[in-house]
Image (cartoon, rainbow, N blue to C red):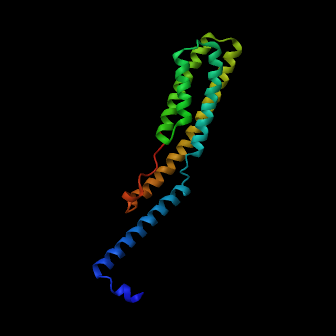
């Protein structure tokens, strides 16, 4: 084996050594980034769970609203679309936009429902909106913690020499 290695031309050996070093550095950088993500809690699962809870509450609101609003009401359709977008959102940016759309659509439908609903449906709609507001506050706290972790990970990412091999750093939830 040693004889075969000695037969390799020096430039080829240097090239192999440089490639091995670069791959080692890139692997180490990837590992450092993954460890930083774990250390700082950069995980979308808590945010996704809260967003899913808000979509569930909006579905409950939709049930109440359908009893009190016309079948083809654009506000009801907008809420249905917002719920679907919230459930299908991927990534922080898409999830944040879907959450804003859901909030607007739910508030609009709730206001329309409160104008036309019976007292019992008004109480139900108000209760569901209170639950959505509570879930939004929890989501906001989770988003702050996530964004703080992302900022710390991005600081580490900015210091890594092989950023171009690692892909993009995690996105913030805006």
| Residue 115 on image: x %, y % | 60, 11
Residue at point 53%, 28% (across, down): 82
Horizontally, residue 142 falls left or right of residue 118, namely: left
Q: Which residue is drawn at 39% across and 72% down?
A: 20
Measured as percent of width and height from the top left, residue 61 is found at: 63, 23
Q: Which quadrant of the structure image shows residue 136?
A: top right
- Outermost right residue: 120
Q: Please tell me in which quadrant of the rendered image residue 110 appears.
A: top right
Residue found 58% across the figure and 36% down from its top:
51
Residue at 52% across / 55% down in the picture? 37
Number of marks in the rendered image: 0
Q: Name above or below for residue 49 compared with residue 34.
A: above
On screen, residue 135 above or below 61: below
The part of the image, by quadrant, that contains residue 16 is bottom left
Where is the N terminus found, in terms of image quarters? bottom left
**Of 34 and 74, the residue lying toward us:** 74
Q: Which residue lies furthest to the bottom in this view?
A: 3
């Amino acid at each position: 084996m040693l004889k075969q290695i000695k037969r390799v031309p020096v430039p080829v050996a240097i090239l192999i050594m440089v490639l091995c070093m670069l791959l080692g550095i890139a692997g180490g950088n990837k590992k450092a980034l993954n460890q930083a993500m774990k250390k700082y809690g950069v995980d979308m699962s808590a945010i996704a769970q809260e967003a899913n809870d808000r979509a569930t509450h909006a579905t409950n609101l939709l049930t109440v609203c359908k009893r009190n609003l016309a079948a083809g009401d654009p506000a009801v359709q907008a809420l249905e679309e917002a719920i679907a977008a919230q459930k299908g959102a991927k990534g922080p940016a898409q999830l944040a936009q879907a959450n804003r759309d859901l909030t607007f659509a739910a508030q609009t439908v709730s206001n329309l429902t409160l104008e036309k609903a019976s007292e019992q449906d008004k109480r139900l709609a108000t209760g569901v909106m209170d639950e959505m507001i509570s879930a939004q506050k929890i989501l906001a706290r989770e988003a702050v913690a996530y964004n703080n972790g992302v900022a710390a990970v991005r600081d580490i990412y900015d210091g890594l020499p092989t950023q171009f091999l690692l892909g993009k750093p995690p996105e913030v939830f805006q």
